[in-house]
Amino acid sequence: MRRAMNNLWGGSVAEAARQLNSSIAVDSRMWREDIEGSLAHAAMLAKQGIISPADGAAIQAGLTGILQDIENGALAIDMSAEDIHTFVEMTLTQRIGEAGKRLHTARSRNDQVATDLRLYTRRRIDELLDLVRDAVAAIHDKAAAYADAVMPGYTHLQRAQPVTFGHYLCAWAMMLIRDAGRLADAKKRLDQCPLGACALAGTSFPIDREATAAALGFSGPVLNSLDAVSDRDFCVETLSALSLLMTHLSRMAEELVLWSSLEFGFVTLPEGYVTGSSIMPQKKNPDMAELIRGKTGRVYGDLTALLTVLKGLPLAYNKDMQEDKQALFDGLDTAALCLTVLSPMIGGMTPHPAAMRKAAGAGFINATDCADWLVEHGVPFREAYGIAASLVHGGKPLEELSLAEYKAACPVFDETIYAAVDLDACVKRRHLPLAEELAAIQAFLQE
């Protein structure tokens, strides 16, 4: 019968204190990274002659077996263990005997945890980058399909100037492309291996830190041993990038909520991403967009929580830092889930160009073009602005004014004003670089 998992440090604490100290409910998800780190560490120990080749081989085989058994469900993680590191090491020792006790030579849980967390964060960033690309691809395809659909652009949520739906959606893609860049930058700065720093001051054993770092795919070891075990900048930076990503997802979600309302009617969200009302049978609520908007605050909270944990800690490791994982994991999970929902919601939405065009024609959004026409015909801009404003205040759409009405406002007007205030002409005259935008987005997708 397998004995219960306890801890690696040999002492005991009161039950309530044990529960406070235990982290396996959170860090158990790093089982793969913990085993990968241990495999690299054991290989280095054997190569350096710190442990015998036989012990090294036994450890390698034992760890590989544990990894495979967890993968296929043959081994359940014992949640009574203090943490995932305890579970893996004690399971290894139960399976291979004395050799398992040599695995932790020249290593502390401090550098072990820091390494696991970097490995895990690196993998999750790669997954998030794929999800961001999926969202950008969905936006690109919809923007290309509705490249010429005229709609009102807004400032202060007031109809301002005409744009196209394709151009509007490209703004969403540009935000996400920047988010991908920030996540990639965060990944670059975590690309160093803490193993070998031990508790805080390195080890007297003749280890090869470069070999361990290379085996785990890092560019090299963290140079300073105190920094190696106490640094959680990469967690903060990742959460910071995720917070800005969620800001952008929230803004997109807000516009989807608005656009799918009867008041706008610009899009219909796909079935499966809206819900009904329990008492109002006519309702289709944009709940998924609203939840993305709402969960943004959760990721902000994760960032704030971690910054607060770290702000007053002296070097090197402090147990407070155990709280890093809950904040980081929640931020990663939340952003990933929101992206997983957003992409098919955008890909499956049905735009309504006629409704967009109708809205564009009802808000005098060609008034600036009217003023610009006057400027082009010699009228100073401030005077032209006032003339255009007086026409707008008359309440009649600019396209429907007679030439006499135009001339009553300013004798400079002639029949070419009608071409100037035509909505399609307004958009074309601005030379919105939609083709270049779509090409830039496509280039990002092909990186």
Image (cartoon, grey):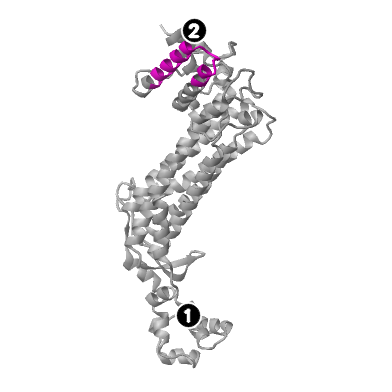
Judged left or right of residue 143, residue 155 is: right
Q: Nearer the viewer, residue 189 or 49?
A: 49
Q: Position of residue 372 (x, y in %)?
A: 50, 81
Instruction: Sort mark 1 into few (<14), some (14-19) or many (20+) by Cα contacts within 10 Å.
Output: some
The reply to whether the C-beta atoms of the residues labelled 2 and 1 are less than 8 Å apart is no
Sequence-first disc among 2 and 1: 2
Quarter occupied by residue 339:
top left
| Distance between mark 2 and mark 1 Cα atoms | 88 Å
> Helix or strand or loop: what does disc 2 sit on?
helix
Q: Residue 433's image quarter?
A: bottom left
Q: Please name the residue shown 47% across and 15% down the image.
A: 56
For residue 392, the mark is 1
* Residue 58 located within the stretch drawn in magenta: yes
Reading the image, the residue beneath label 2 is 98
Q: Amino acid under label 1? A: Val
The magenta-colored residue range is 43-67
Outermost residue on the top side: it is 1
Write the residue at 47% across / 40% down.
125
Image location of residue 276, percent across then percent down: 32, 48
Task: Give the left or right position of residue 34, taking residue 73 as reference.
Answer: right
Which of the pair 234/318 is nearer the observer? 234
Q: Which numbered disc, 2 or 1, marks the residue closer to the eye? A: 2
Q: Is residue 283 visible?
A: no
Residue 418 magenta-highlighted: no
Q: Residue 166: horizontal and vertical position, in percent?
A: 38, 63
Residue type, label 2: Glu
Say which of 384 and 436 sits in front: 436
